[in-house]
């Protein structure tokens, strides 16, 4: 924090989601002095509440957003190479019920998708017989089922991807700080020269000087724009995306499945095997409520369950089956008169009269391209003719080395973790979360063998991850650990209460909390979970 207040930076990035993380890495890797400020925790907004896909966006072809699809396919290919431990190719099933014309339309769209992707390591689509579809999804509705298609996209852990990009930026010299909220844009002669900020953990107010400022605040873009220009007009149209986590045995899926909506809105949702369960989402509805507490309503739950039961009638999903739920907000660039489904997911960048660069819109998959565009504008604005060109297409994440494949990384992680007495599922979880940096977790276990124990039985996260998150990932609250450093809050169900207490104890030892603070921090998150559960059932 002292460095934040004493240095004058080349760039302040406001917003610690995936786009801000990408800008921080890009700018720092080009030699700029960068501070990244996030008012809550890193990835606490939409960047931890997406559908966890790195994808070209098959449905964007239907809306003729060809440039966006192509750009996303290119970025998907890059991420497979830059983070093979965290971006996993995965089959997606599209069942077909409507006969020849629908089948031909789907086939043509998938061939175009394959040609735009041209992905190394990802197989082209293929047609499936009726029996093959049933083998991949045995509970699927069989009446009028004629076959289907398998195509390939990628899935990820969005919050871990964000954290790994932030950590990579820090290795290049960037200074990321969470729980610091920008409350004012400072100016001299009408030009932005820094920010006034408040430390939300201590209440301290201070100023940070910089030659340039970039806002990558997603759904909060309009609020930051108002700080810069009190007359600024709103440009963001928030669209809520709600998700459910269901037990995998309820659907028995061997692939992800595109599930048609049970209404007449023409949408589909994804059912994606994820961390041993099934992630179901998403909705796409206008949202006008608080951006800091986005509820999953009864209507959201009913919409998702109705679509699932229509395609998988034997599953008989009810609200009692839901392990957890969450919702995020897409920061769509408003297009008056268009439905949220029809609004483009393309991003927009612009410069305010004071010189602040804003980026809004976009999607998880294209964060690197968005970051490159913003950093190019910053460098041009500062007149840094000697600055390095963008190299993030070659910067591997999490200690992974060029040419290392996912299979090779898995084999090495299993071997290393076995030597520490860790089971295979733990090894693979550590690799997914940390890449080759899992070796730092093993060193922490050397300090105390008890840290090799699982936080919750049957789930692969271990106690050493809590220690690592406090030391190297700026975790400051119990929620930071359970919702974003790990995904236990989404997977633990009614076992979460005990995990909250154990996590608070471990954090207390690392962060020097006294007994009262340990109890308080645990209770704060218990109350938060209770509030969210109450909100979940509101109409």
Image (tube, rainbow, N blue to C red):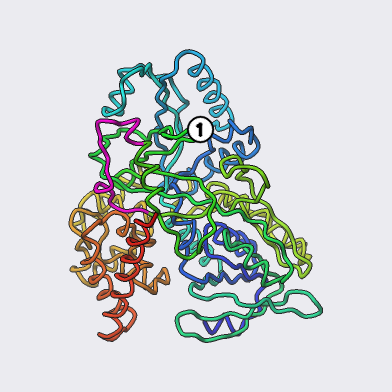
Q: Residue furthest right?
A: 189
Which quadrant of the view contains residue 62? top right
Image quadrant occupied by the C terminus? bottom left
Q: Which residue is mark 1?
A: 266
Q: How packed is label 1: few (under 14 Cα within 10 Å), some, or many (20 or more)?
A: few
Residue 318: percent from left, percent from top: 27, 43
Residue 26: percent from left, percent from top: 61, 59
Compare residues 3 and 191 and report the one nearer the observer.
Answer: 191
Compare residues 119 and 332 and report the one nearer the observer.
Answer: 332
**Residue pictured at 25% horizontal, 66% vertical:** 463
Compare residues 280 and 533 and report the one nearer the observer.
Answer: 533
**Residue pictured at 33% horizontal, 62% vertical:** 534
Check disc 1 and report its element: helix, strand or loop: loop
Compare residues 99 and 115 and report the one nearer the observer.
Answer: 99
**Residue pictured at 50% horizontal, 35% vertical:** 265
Q: Is residue 350 above or below residue 175?
A: above
Residue 529: percent from left, percent from top: 32, 65
Q: Is residue 421 left or right of residue 284?
A: left
- The total number of labels drawn is 1
Residue 380: percent from left, percent from top: 76, 61
Q: Is residue 127 above or below residue 202?
A: above
**Residue pictured at 54% horizontal, 72% vertical:** 175
- The segment highlighted magenta reads 308-325
Q: Residue furthest front?
A: 539
Q: Is residue 204 above or below residue 288?
A: below
Q: Is 354 included in the stretch rendered in magenta?
A: no
């Amino acid at each position: 924090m002292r460095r934040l207040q004493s240095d004058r930076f080349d760039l302040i990035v406001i917003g610690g989601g995936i786009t801000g993380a990408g800008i921080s890495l890009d700018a720092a890797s080009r030699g700029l002095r960068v501070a990244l400020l996030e008012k809550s925790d890193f990835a606490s907004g939409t960047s931890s509440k997406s559908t966890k896909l790195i994808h070209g966006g098959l449905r964007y072809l239907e809306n003729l957003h060809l440039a966006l699809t192509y750009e996303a396919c290119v970025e998907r290919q890059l991420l497979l190479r830059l983070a093979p431990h965290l971006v996993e190719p995965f089959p997606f099933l599209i069942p077909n019920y409507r006969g020849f014309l629908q089948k031909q339309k789907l086939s043509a769209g998938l061939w175009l998708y394959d040609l735009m992707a041209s992905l190394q390591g990802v197989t082209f689509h293929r047609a499936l017989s009726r029996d093959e579809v049933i083998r991949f999804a045995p509970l699927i509705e069989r009446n009028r089922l004629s076959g289907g298609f398998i195509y390939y996209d990628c899935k990820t852990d969005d919050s871990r991807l964000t954290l790994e990009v932030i950590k990579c930026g820090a290795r290049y010299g960037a200074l990321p700080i969470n729980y610091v909220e920008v409350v004012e844009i400072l100016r001299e002669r009408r030009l932005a020269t820094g920010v006034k900020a408040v430390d939300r953990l201590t209440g301290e107010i201070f100023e940070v000087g910089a030659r340039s400022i970039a806002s990558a605040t997603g759904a909060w873009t309009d609020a930051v724009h108002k700080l810069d220009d009190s007359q600024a007009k709103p440009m963001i149209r928030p669209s809520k995306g709600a998700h459910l986590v269901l037990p995998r045995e309820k659907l028995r899926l061997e692939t992800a499945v595109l599930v048609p909506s049970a209404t007449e809105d023409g949408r589909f949702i994804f059912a994606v095997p994820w961390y041993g369960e099934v992630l179901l989402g998403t909705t796409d509805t206008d949202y006008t409520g608080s951006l800091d507490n986005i509820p999953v309503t009864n209507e959201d739950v009913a919409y998702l369950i109705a679509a699932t039961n229509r395609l998988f009638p034997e599953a008989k999903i009810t609200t009692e089956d839901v392990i957890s739920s969450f919702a995020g907000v897409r920061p769509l660039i408003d297009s008056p008169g268009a439905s949220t489904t029809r609004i483009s997911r393309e991003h927009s960048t612009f410069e305010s009269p004071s010189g602040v660069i804003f980026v809004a819109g976009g999607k998880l998959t294209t964060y690197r391209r968005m970051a490159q565009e913003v950093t190019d504008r910053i460098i041009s604005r500062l007149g840094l003719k000697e600055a390095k060109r963008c190299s993030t297409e070659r910067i591997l994440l999490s200690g992974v080395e060029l040419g290392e494949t996912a299979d090779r990384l898995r084999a090495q992680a299993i071997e290393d973790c076995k030597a520490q007495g860790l089971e295979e599922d733990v090894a693979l979880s550590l690799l997914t979360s940390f890449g080759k940096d899992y070796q730092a977790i093993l060193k922490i276990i050397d300090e105390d063998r008890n840290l090799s124990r699982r936080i919750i039985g049957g789930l692969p996260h271990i106690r050493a991850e809590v220690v690592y998150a406090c030391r190297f990932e700026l975790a400051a609250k119990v929620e930071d650990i359970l919702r974003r450093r790990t995904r236990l809050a989404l997977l633990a169900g009614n076992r979460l209460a005990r995990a909250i207490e154990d996590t608070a104890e471990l954090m207390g030892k690392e962060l020097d909390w006294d007994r009262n603070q340990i109890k308080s921090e645990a209770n704060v998150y218990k109350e938060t979970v209770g509030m969210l559960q109450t909100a979940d059932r509101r109409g």
